[in-house]
Amino acid sequence: MDIDLSIGGIQAALNSSLDVRDFVHDDGSGTNNVVSSMAFVPRFKTSGWPQSALNGLEVGGFFVDVYEACQPDATSLIRGGTTPNTPGSVAACSKPGVVPWTDIDWLNARIAASNRTINGRSCHLITPFERFSILSLIMAAGQWGQQRGNNNNGKDTRDADSWENKGIIDPVVPAYRVLTGSGPASWWHNGLPGRGIHNLVSNIYEWEDCRIESGFIQPKAYLAGATAASATYIDYDDNAGGDGANIHQLTPGVYTITDATYGNEDVTVERVIITGRFTGRLILSAATSLQHIDNALIQLKTALDLSDGVTAGWAAIGALLEDATGKYMGLPNKADTSTYASTLLDSWYKYDAGDSRALSRCGNWVNTTKARSGLVVDTHDEPTSTNTDIGFRAALSIGNL
């Protein structure tokens, strides 16, 4: 990374630094404590995006893992003692210099992330809204395209093949995967080691809390309790389903409450506070007009269409979605694969036409130019897929309930 030492460049770097905290939490055993490093993404308004619809949005207001998630007892030599895809009550951690937690499917990544409880609130698998917030932080700070990562067998494809440009090889997957937190300063989102988020560009894909059904994204949940008319917020859960397999943590946007008793109603969600594994609170832009029954379905009003027909290979990401909810998720517009390709650094998008897929982003150690911005989107893995190149990252909502 070329460091801009001008007054403006230094100010931009300082503005992009984040409050990084070490949180002590139970490892899931009920008896042992561990430490996870998380960075606070403040609330701010987006700017700098080439599409006007993506600017002026209020985002942020959460903590996110500084490093790719790992097992509590992970070291630089082993992943830890937990069977990767059977987390049980084990809480995912965020710490440097260790083997990342991969070989875990989408649902179990959600469980492992939410097993971490901080100050009485559960963490959760990072959402598309939170990913977009982080990318917007980089864009607003003028750092877009500067952060790098392991997208070329231990180094960034833009850097020379020399030791100072590489991360520390992970012995569990010695074919060029690297340990969490390792690599040069350019692998931090702002070029400032210890003052931001590490490895947003590649090394491993990261699951996000979003499912794709037959090419469509239409997040849904259920009202967690009856509401009165004039409610300014709504609590949601998974309708006591238990496994959360068919719901999403929601994101800002326009949703429809389907209520056979009191009538259907559209509501605009301006903020989401995620409270548990499959639970959250929606802060509404205006009070509801109707009362609603417990367990009424709440679903994104207009599904996001990602079915661009790319069933093999990749398509370049051009414009991003600009609709009421899509603009908060940083997802590709299938109708435009060229307009902003250079601005978005040739990030790419892969889609599978089969039913039931889960979103992953970030890229892996062999993606090269397909993963140069952290925006690369891969939607071809099933929720039950496990692989050495897919891990996850946790986040923590803040705000009063």
Image (cartoon, rainbow, N blue to C red):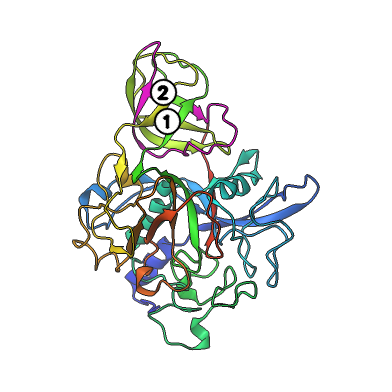
Query: What residue appears at the point 70 percent right and 68 percent down from the top-left corner?
Result: 78
Percent position of residue 52, x then y:
21, 50
What residue is disc 1 on? 283
Residue pushed farthest left? 339
Q: Is residue 370 visible?
A: yes
Q: Is residue 55 visible?
A: no
Q: Is residue 236 above or below residue 48?
A: above
* Left or right: 81 as drawn, with respect to 279: right
Percent position of residue 235, x then y:
49, 27
The secondary structure that dominates the magenta segment is: loop
Percent position of residue 89, x then y:
70, 45
Q: Is residue 350 above or below residue 293?
A: below
* Left or right: 142 as drawn, with respect to 364: left
Residue 154 magenta: no
Dot 1 falls on a residue whose secondary structure is strand
Range drawn in magenta: 235-262
Residue 252 magenta: yes
Query: What residue appears at the point 32 percent right and 69 percent down from the top-left corner?
Result: 8
- Viewer-side residue, 381 vs 111: 381
* Left or right: 19 as drawn, with respect to 331: right
What residue is disc 2 on? 232
The three-letter code of the residue at mark 1 reads: Ile
Within-10-Å neighbours for mark 1: few <14, some 14–19, many 20+: many
State the mark number for residue 20: none
Within-10-Å neighbours for mark 2: few <14, some 14–19, many 20+: some
Q: Is residue 289 above or below residue 92?
A: above
**Quadrant location of the N terminus?**
bottom left
First in sequence, mark 2 or 1: give its number. Answer: 2
The three-letter code of the residue at mark 2 reads: Thr
Query: What residue appears at the point 43 percent right and 38 percent down from the top-left corner?
Result: 250
Mark 2 vs 1: CB contact within 8 A: yes
